[in-house]
Image (spheres, rainbow, N blue to C red):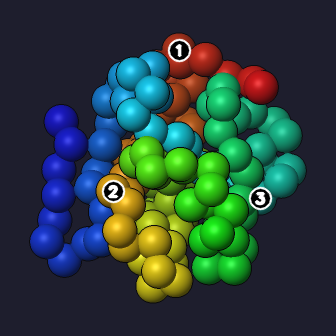
Amino acid sequence: MATKDPREPFTRISVTEAKEKLDKGEAVMVDVREPHEYAEVHARGVRLIPVNSVMGEVKQIRDFAGGKDVLFICKSGQRSALAAEFATAAGLEDLPLYNVEGGTLAWVEAGLPTGD
């Protein structure tokens, strides 16, 4: 179940909840891992923006989101939390931001769709 810590600018969300939001068209997902990690396996439909590029790519993220919720995913959930912090610091605080707990490892383990 999605949880919000008042000290964080994002809500923590499970891979199943993330998939439901994506299926309903309520959200977009940004993979913040490195290109070689993304090439190995990634959730279907994600946009690759490595964590260290997030602050400089806020306009791209905003355009990609089109007003929808933004879900950040990485390998296990740590870099994606940092990416949400970076996005907030760079001016994306007006969109609901989520950190996908467990990341791509949990996504794959849950048998959710991967690839383009």
Would residue 19 be seen by someone viewing this image from the given angle? no
Q: Which mark is nearer the camera, 3 or 2?
A: 2
Which secondary structure, mark 1?
loop
The CA span between labels 3 and 2 is 24 Å
- Identity of the amino acid at label 2? Pro
**Image point 45% across, 51% down: which residue?**
67
Instruction: Determine which residue is flagged by label 3.
Output: 34
Q: Which of these two is toward me, 33 or 25?
A: 25
Residue 108 higher or lower than 81, as above or below? above
Question: Are there few (<14), some (14-19), or many (20+) residues within 10 Å of tag 3?
Answer: some
- Identity of the amino acid at label 3? Glu
Q: Residue furthest left?
A: 6
Residue 93 higher or lower than 26, as above or below? below
Q: x and y percent of residue 93 in the render?
A: 37, 73
Q: Which mark is residue 100?
A: none
Residue 27 higher or lower than 84, as above or below? above
Instruction: Determine which residue is flagged by label 1.
Output: 111
- Which of pointers 3 and 2 lies earlier in the amino acid sequence? 3
